[in-house]
Image (tube, coloured by chain):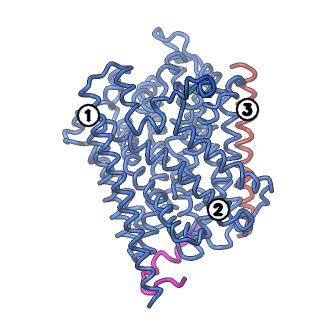
Amino acid sequence: MPFPFFLSMENRNETWGSRTGLILAMAGNAVGLGNFLRFPVQAIQNGGGTFIIPYLVCFVVLGIPLLFTEWSIGRFGGKSGNHSTPYILEAMGKSSWWKYIGVFGIFTNIAVVAYYTYIESWTLIYVFHTLFGTFTDMSQLAVSNYFEQYVNLSGSDFGIHLFPFWIYVLVLGINGYILSTGLGGIEKVAKIGMPLLILFGIILAIKGWTMGAENASALFPDANAWEGLNFLWTPQFSSLWDPKVWLAAAGQIFFTLSVGMGSIQCYASYLKSNEDIALNSLASGFTNEFVEIVLGSAIVIPIAAGFLGMDWVLNNAGFGMAFQTMPYLFQQWGAVFGIIAGVCWFGLLFFAGITSSLAMGTPWMGFMNDEFGWGKVKCAFSFAVLALLMGAPTILFYQYGYFEEYDYWAGTVSLVIFALLEMILFAWVFGMNKGWVELNSGADIRIPLFFKWVMCYLTPVLLLLVLIGALVTPAGNDWLTAFSGLWNGEGWKMDAHSLVSKIFHGDLIHTMEEEGKSDAWLSDRVFFSNMARIQLLALFALITGIVWYSGLKRKSHTHE
Amino acid sequence: MSNSALFLAVVVQLAVVGMTVFCFYKVLKLPK
């Protein structure tokens, strides 16, 4: 189909400046906060060393196939001048209905970037707090409370009301500015940010591996970083039979590689038609794994264990540790190294965040430029405004779970759904034989034929299992009891956090009962949860509408 | 740290580092 010739050619010939820039940008897309915060926590909660085995298996049979698929789909769509998933998928699937599946590839990015950039803004402000010595001489409780009052908007940093909100706007502005300079700007950030991230990570990882018991204290006399490392890496083979561990591993591989979002396809659409996919995708995938397994595992858990002991870590390990605990621990290393460690930590988190958030901006920009001829500045500005509109409630209503609601539906569920659909498209609709040819075209390495079989049969089945696992998670993640319940007449007891239960706010009711919360608490949480869902649906409807309108435009041009 | 933990940590991390280095080596070695 010929391009509507009068549309701006500004982005159409845009391509990556260098191969290293492309790989670092793709790696940056994948490397994010999850590498440092989610992976170690998942490992701890799923048997420590045994987690690594299902994790690596899932990397091979889920991660790499999805990377191959998304890069291939992207480059294929780019050949016909399409730079975001609606028309990329339509090009591959032939039926015009595929463009509505492609809506996910824009929706998820905007919905996630809305709250993701808020976390990014925390990392940025914490770099400055570290440099200004805000946490010097603060007790652990004070450091933790500082974070609480920050996200509850009850503090007044520098006397500025709603200071966290303005820093968020600043970070959106930074993202918007870089996006307005096109792929070149994204590449530059990746070429500076990724090496710095790796350097900072190596500095902290060396500390994690070498600190041992030197930071044990009277309060925590048994604290030893080696215990953290030991727990993380000791294989416990019994958990290999637990479906919960395999599901957790699959989930982690998903999030860590940023598949199912639509940003990889977008980046890949700027490849030249004969540019390699096989080696490039593996290089970026392994860079992500290097950051996750080698660096991510060596920082939070060992350092926390080295100060607070393994018991504390097992009871408290979670996302909040990054901001509520680490700053306190760093300053125990003295004035100079404490600041270096803090700047390294929040600096690497910021680079991890921004390289991911920039990627999330490109599908919207690609689409609006392709279909409506919008220039880069207009695209970037509109993206930032959309992100702000979506994100503002997650900041203002943080304590009501608005943030978590987005993260669940957009940042968890929609990824798996979209990945399953695109896998079916690539392997079954487009056809695995054609797909294999497409993938290997221009390849700089030979991909083992084993992957052809995996992508066709194994990966879609695994994705389906992950989705079913999330839909009907058994109570307490006890799969054995749930299955036997099907036979002995007790039925399948669903967990409060299963998708089906969550739709009806079963998780909130469960929390209310477990933690003795009031009815007022529940009605507040239910209200804001419903508001967040309405907002997400509105965004999905908006993008669907824009895609539908673009379809009309395309049809009318074809008739001219 | 137990021997099995150290063994697993070293083997897995060396493998990941090795694959990453291998990929970048191939990329940088190629003429294009």
Q: Which residues are magenta?
A: A1-17
Q: Badge 3 sits on which subunit?
A: B
Front residue of B24/A360: it is A360
Q: Secondary structure at mark 2?
A: helix
Query: Which comes before the other along the chain, label 2 or label 1?
Result: 2
Q: Badge 1 sits on which subunit?
A: A
- Rendered colour, chain A: blue
Q: In which quadrant of the rendered view does residue A395 lie?
A: top left
Q: CA distance from mark 2 to mark 3?
A: 37 Å
Residue A397 as seen in the image, left or right of residue B16: left
**What amino acid type should be assigned to the residue bearing mark 3?**
Val
* Residue B8 drawn above or below residue A189: above
Mark 2 = which residue?
Answer: A426
Whether the magenta-drawn stretch holds residue A424 is answered as no
Which numbered circle lies on residue A524? 1
Q: CA distance from mark 2 to mark 1?
A: 43 Å
Residue A209 visible (yes or no): no
Mark 3 = which residue?
Answer: B10
- Chain rendered red: B
